[in-house]
Amino acid sequence: MKSLIELYKIGSGPSSSHTMGPEKATRIFKAENEGAERFKVLIYGSLAKTGKGHMTDKAIIKALSPVPTEIEFITHVDFILPHPNTIDFLAYKDGRQTTSMRVVSVGGGDIVIDGREEMLAPDIYKENTFEEISSLCKANNISLSEYIEQCEGKKIWDFLYEIWDAMKRSINEGLTSTGVLEGGLNVERKAQFLYNQRHIDESPETRENRIVCAYAFAVSEQNAAGGTIVTAPTCGASGVVPAVLRYMQEKKHVTDEQIIRALAVGGLIGNLIKQNASISGAKCGCQGEVGSACSMASAALSELFGMDIDQIEYAAEVALEHHLGLTCDPICGLVQIPCIERNAVAAMRAINAMNLANFLSNTRKISFDLVVQTMYETGLDMSSDYRETADGGLAKLYKIDS
């Protein structure tokens, strides 16, 4: 299993698989073809169907500039794609094609280049399931965060401090921004409104919901606008983890050191999902993105509150289990509706899952590993219309006002 450095990435929205991944691949291809006179990029599958809304074409053209570039969106093919997010890069010189490169964007900003598996990041963790990790930790009387440090080294904490700073900045920037998001849906930014509009008879519970939602909206709106966020585990689900951790830090006055240990445990959960299933909306629907983010957030909160390994597992399992079957149906291919609200709802659900785990972990029947396997099989069984293609669900039925 890979390092947490491969999970948490600081980058520009709105989509880790549709903008961050393709941009990374584009820069590699450009560097290898400095003498090219023009480029052609063929974008297939889910990338083709939602690429314009996700700004895939803009990210690629910007990365290849100033070399002339033709982009072709191919929504239907007569061959089997290696992944729903597949791209072919072609370079030309003196009127002929000189080279090509096939890339799949597998989610979270990660890419796999055909024939170059040696470029993949090395494995850091020997264990690949929660059961294996839990058994090792209990046998050696260590916590999950101590296990992570043993595998990653102390340098992981400096990295996670940077990640936490970036998460807080994305919240602050989102809270201070207003206006309408680009894309044609006329979606107004609501984070600042939620943060400032106290209910006339607001209970502590209502305030918690309002502030947590404000933070999730802030990050998600920044992402939708192409701002800088942290993949947790993806751009489209980037609002969940920072929202709950920022709120609890303020409420409980916990230190940044406690927060980064919570981030580490949440990241471990995200890594397990990424290793054994998928965090790609094109592969598994939104259960793989927001569902995974909710699971990460709930585990992180459980670590923050000093809960034991079984309670952390139960929190992560509950959070993911109750996102099973969640579709990815972005209207117009934009990461706005239902994505922004969905981050806020998942943030609140993460808190609920953590609270349940505090009381009920000794009664659980379902393991985290089992629900991860279930999520993956559910995603594969799901119609492609509901896996980030904008062909089904809200994307199909919603009629844009003229």
Image: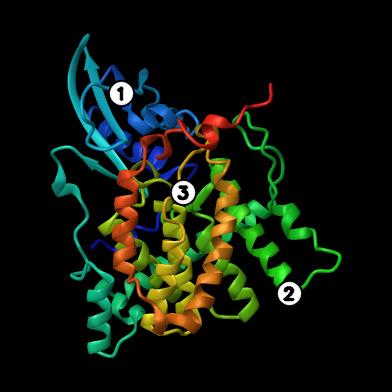
Amino acid identity at mark 1: Leu
Q: Residue at x 35, y 75 (%)?
A: 365
Q: Residue at x 31, y 53 (%)?
A: 376
Query: In this view of the protein, which residue sits in the foreground, 234 or 342?
Result: 342
Q: Residue 201, percent across and down?
A: 84, 68
Pick the quarter of the image with the N terminus.
bottom left
**Would residue 242 be visible to someone looking at this image?**
yes
In the rendered image, the vertical position of residue 394 relative to residue 273, given as above or below = above
Query: In this view of the protein, which residue sits in the foreground, 84 or 121?
Result: 84
Amino acid identity at mark 2: Pro
Q: Residue at x 47, y 62 (%)?
A: 294
User: For the residue carrying disc 2, how many other residues have a C-alpha within 10 Å: few (<14), some (14-19), or many (20+)?
Assistant: few
Please tell me which of labels 1 and 3 falls first in the chain: 1
User: For the residue carrying disc 3, how many other residues have a C-alpha within 10 Å: few (<14), some (14-19), or many (20+)?
Assistant: many
Verify CB contact (< 8 Å) between mark 2 and mark 1.
no
Say which residue label 3 marks: 235
Does residue 91 appear to the left or right of 159 in the view shown?
Answer: left
Say which residue label 2 marks: 204
Please tell me which of labels 2 and 3 falls first in the chain: 2
Say which residue label 1 marks: 42
In the rendered image, the vertical position of residue 154 relative to residue 49, given as above or below = below
Does residue 107 appear to the left or right of 127 in the view shown?
Answer: right
Cα–Cα span, label 1 and label 3: 23 Å
Question: What SS does tag 3 mark?
Answer: loop
Report which quarter residue 157 is drawn in: bottom left
Amino acid identity at mark 3: Cys
